[in-house]
Amino acid sequence: MPSIRSAGARAALLLLAAAPLRGQSAAPEPSAAWKERLAREVAAVIDAGDSTAVDAFVRDRVSPRRLERGAAARLTGTLLGIARQGGGVEVRALEPWGGGVLAELWARRTDRGVRLYVSPDRGDSTRISGLETLGFIHPEAAVRLEPREGDDLAAVLRRLDAEVDRLAAADEFSGTVLVARGDSVVYERAAGVADRRTGEPVRPGTRFHSASMGKMFTAVAVGQLVEAGRLRWDDSLAAVLPDLPWHPGLRGVTVAQLLGHFSGVGGWWSGAPGDDSLPPARSRLEEVARYASRPPLSPPGSRWSYSNEGFEVLAAIVERRGGAPFHRYLAERVFAPAGMRGVSAGVPATDAAVGYGLAGDDPFGMGPRAGFEARVAGRAAGGSGGQFATARDYFRFARALHDGALLRGATLDSLLVAGFDQGVMPWGPQQYARGFTTALEGGRLLLGHAGGGMHWGICGRMDTLRDGGWTVVVLSNYDPPVCEVLARRVLASLARLPGG
């Protein structure tokens, strides 16, 4: 994971791809066959396992802008690590995923695989811009829960309970699972260990790091300001934060582009010379002002690129137009009206789960998990996420969205306008809207967000049906993707129940 300065962004990561926003121009999309060819080339160089060849491949075939600030050495190390631990790899599956391909590469010396995301550069399709490992695969970690004909609620919950037992016994899941129907919680379960040093078990009220799930809170805050007439979706940075030293290429970036990850804002916390010598910022505005003069990674509106930095800019906008520090605005205008009593602003409490993730040199998940509490300890949450919350907090947040306690229905619908088709994710198809992801389950609109990242010991997902029916929350202090897959498989089963 890149070295980043923003507190919320440090703990928030969701690795996704690039595609054009509806109605906006972009370079022609490379063909699916060409994307698969790139993925197979990456697999072939990994399988060969020759360090000189891998180094040359990264240098010659990866986009130059992807290789800034030491990224070449990191990518070379990642590919060689997969080769060495796996004894070479073979391609088992290739699936479209956003602007690229999700490749399942299985080790030749063990029954384990790794998911590798590969995407071509939009400006030069002969080069690679996206190259990320998204998690390991092995039989015990596969979620064995699928919708079945003839199921009723009791049957779904029995199979869910058995699957939580199995995954916990295999040490592939530690966390909480909550299922609600309308206003009623019908299932709540905790499994695993919150803190291995003390032996404290995970409990239903255990708080977990939100990572990027917190982007939903930022989106709601922005929506409230739009409702109040203090902000518009098409307001530019030059208009809402005119006193900041914006790069000319960023002055026209709109609030909607920031929410939808089409702003071009990014690369702020990637280890530029002098960054580490800067004292802590005293406010969101001061933090953003430090980086406002940096150029966009791409022309605003031209390509989708997941941007934690863009949501930190939104937090600064909330502070300016909302008239209060960001954390206080959320506490008073989002968490309190929703009844989210367990949320903390980022500093772990005694009842917060410690994150346990895999080491960076363990792509196939063959070694023990290490505690990563030092990576998030003492860091305040931000616009990109980082709060600590319980499963009940997310359930209350979902109900407040449905009941109109936070936003009018029309405003929420404006946040659910999908701008980017993320394609087939490891847990199903979905799109990115404005601070929320959306999907269809059983023909019904689903909204929510995931959070976490490999080697952080953070994984979470909240999904709720727009019609107010089912809500599913799964929080974990282990690496993705097990918790995310489990959440979506449960909801897929529930959404198909008669009368559900």
Image (cartoon, grey):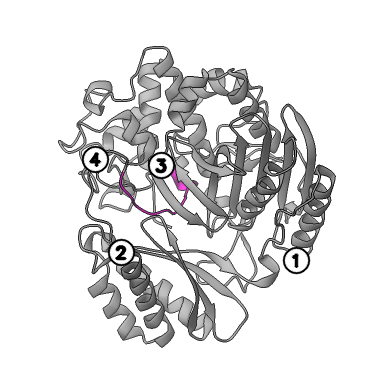
Residue range (magenta): 9-20
Q: Nearer the viewer, residue 80 or 303?
A: 303
- N-terminal of the pair, mark 4 or mark 2, is 2
Q: Position of residue 430 (x, y in %)?
A: 50, 47
Label 3 residue SS: loop
Disc 2 residue type (three-letter)? Ser
- N-terminal of the pair, mark 1 or mark 4, is 1
What residue is disc 3 on? Answer: 6
What residue is disc 1 on? Answer: 170
Label 4 residue SS: loop
Whether the residues at callouts 4 and 3 have beta carbons within 8 Å, the answer is: no
Single out the mark in the foreground, 1 or 4.
Answer: 4
Q: Give the prevailing secondary structure in the magenta stretch.
A: loop
Measured in 3D between alpha carbons, the distance from the residue under mark 1 to the one under mark 2, in whole angstroms, is 40 Å
Q: Is residue 64 left or right of residue 204?
A: left
Residue 200: image tag: none
Q: Is residue 425 left or right of residue 373?
A: left
Q: For mark 4, does the 10 Å Cα neighbourhood hold few (<14), some (14 to 19), or many (20 or more) residues?
A: many
Disc 4 residue type (three-letter)? Pro
> What residue lies at 53% left-to-right and 81% top-to-bottom?
86
> What residue lies at 23% left-to-right and 74% top-to-bottom?
60
- N-terminal of the pair, mark 4 or mark 3, is 3
Whether the residues at callouts 1 and 3 have beta carbons within 8 Å, the answer is: no
- N-terminal of the pair, mark 1 or mark 3, is 3
> What residue lies at 46% left-to-right and 30% top-to-bottom?
218
